[in-house]
Amino acid sequence: MTDKIVVAALYKFVSLPDYVALREPLLQTLLENGIKGTLLLAEEGINGTVSGSRAAIDALFAWFARDPRLADVDHKESFCEEQPFYRTKVKLKKEIVTLGVPGVDPNARVGTYVEAKDWNALIDDPEVLVIDTRNDYEVAIGSFEGAVDPQTKSFRDFPEYVKAHFDPARHKKVAMFCTGGIRCEKASSYMLGEGFEAVYHLKGGILKYLEEVPESETRWRGDCFVFDNRVTVRHDLSEGDYDQCHACRTPISVADRESEHYAPGISCPHCWDNLSEKTRAGARERQKQIELARARNQPHPLGRDPRQAD
């Protein structure tokens, strides 16, 4: 296990008024340790997924530990054989996960954290409304039994769905979850502001649940989408069988790849009939460059460009 690449998904809502000044020393720490991936900094905190050797990831968290605000940054680890990222970035943002609602501040108000070991008991309660706060393409490949799918294209769509479908007077208990915990934590702050009283969210998200809850006791069904080149992970956190369409960014299954509408790097059954010719031409050229790089046994930065969790 020690020879494998460590993938660390991390975030923390914490007041960082000097976040702009933090960017350069953080980026240098990543570069000096050969760490790949993207971290987001904003006044409300830090978020992202990075990967590197065991020693490199330990060095990053040692750097965090020198700042009391980041010393206990929440993170989940998984492992893979190859580097899942091609670039190293630290970006400055207005929000570390974009909800787009002014005044929502998890540093000031947040729902009740639920540990992975206690999650089954909570969602088994018939009075609890369970909401998946992730996007439609994530939910399509896996979710918890009985969870509501808001069918959002972006986390920014979540507030509108809540206003249209849920009522604090009727929905007395709400439990939410997401990949690593950041979206459901911010959603809990929003829901409290909308008048929902008993709001719970899964601490550490799906990844922590899959890590800690035995598969024999799981309420999870399917794979979990992750924002790196693995695309999905199974219950044991090993890499799943999904790939990702380079044209529309949708996760594609083994069956999708057997479709007559699947062209590697160019189209898939989800997008073949609605791509513009400009998009197709760009996809063809990108795939050509990827194949040339592969023939030279070189990684290509456009091989996959995973979406940020938005």
Image (spheres, rainbow, N blue to C red):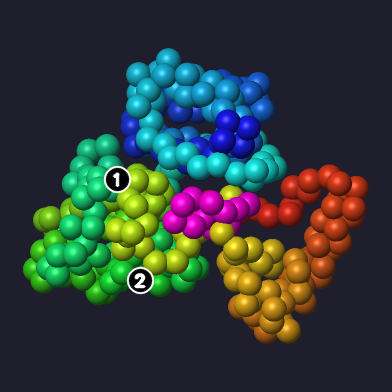
Give the crowd class for mark 2: few <14, some 14-19, many >=20 residues within 10 Å: some
Q: Quick one: which residue is furthest to the top in this view?
A: 66
Q: Is residue 43 visible?
A: yes
Residue 237 highlighted magenta (yes or no): yes
Residue at image position (37%, 23%) is: 71
Q: Residues within 10 Å of mark 1 (few under 14, many from 20)?
A: many
Our reading of the magenta stretch's main secondary structure is: loop
Task: Indicate the quadrant where residue 134 lies.
Answer: bottom left
The secondary structure type at the circle numbered 2 is: loop
**Side of 166 relative to 156 (left or right):** left
The image quadrant that residue 79 belongs to is: top right
Q: What amino acid is found at the position of numbered circle 1 in the picture? A: Lys
User: Dot 1 corresponds to which residue?
Assistant: 203
- Given residues 299 and 308, the one toward you in this image is 299
Residue closer to the observer: 157 or 200: 200
Q: In the drawing, does residue 164 fall left or right of residue 220? A: left
